[in-house]
Amino acid sequence: MHEKFFTASPEGITNKNFSLAGTYIHGIFDNDEFRALWLNNIRRSKNYEARNIINTRSVRDNIFNEIAKLLNQNLDINFILELIHREDTTPQPE
């Protein structure tokens, strides 16, 4: 008898050895530990060395802080705020 290749559930689908999977769970790979476990399982199956967990929130926060620092150094925020709050004196068509 032909064995079922895929196992389905309300959350998604996978083959029997979990080398292929799909999911409707949004953001599942945002979890650093889960993502590292998943990728390291794939790495080990290919005889590659496992990697450490990367704290992506920390990496992302550092990048945003660098961008904010550059903006503060290179933009005149007070001038921009003045432009935003300036009353429009452009003549309006009648």
Image (cartoon, rainbow, N blue to C red):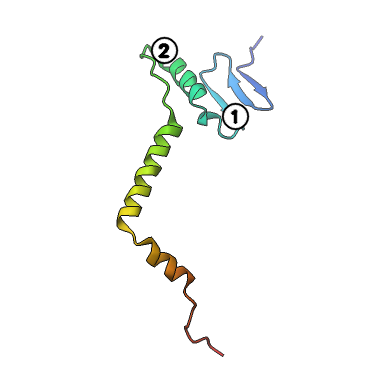
Image disc number at residue 49: none
Crowding at mark 1 (Cα within 10 Å: few <14, some 14-19, many 20+): few
Q: Residue furthest right?
A: 10
Left or right placement of residue 33 versus residue 12 in this view: left
Q: Looking at the image, which residue is at 36% across and 14% down?
A: 48
Q: Looking at the image, which residue is at 49% across and 77% down?
A: 87
Q: Is residue 17 above or below residue 82?
A: above
Residue 29, how many percent across, how many down?
A: 51, 29
Given residues 24 and 30, the one toward you in this image is 30
Q: Looking at the image, which residue is at 43% across and 28% down?
A: 55
Left or right placement of residue 16 versus residue 85 in this view: right
Q: Would you identify the image quadrant in which residue 8 lies?
A: top right
As measured in the structure, the alpha-carbon distance from the residue carrying label 2 to the one carrying label 1 is 22 Å
Residue on which disc 1 sits: 23
Callout 2–callout 1 Cβ contact below 8 Å: no
If the image is split into quadrants, where does the C terminus sit?
A: bottom right
Residue 43, how many percent across, how many down?
A: 41, 16
Total marks drawn?
2
Q: Residue furthest front?
A: 78
Residue on which disc 2 sits: 44
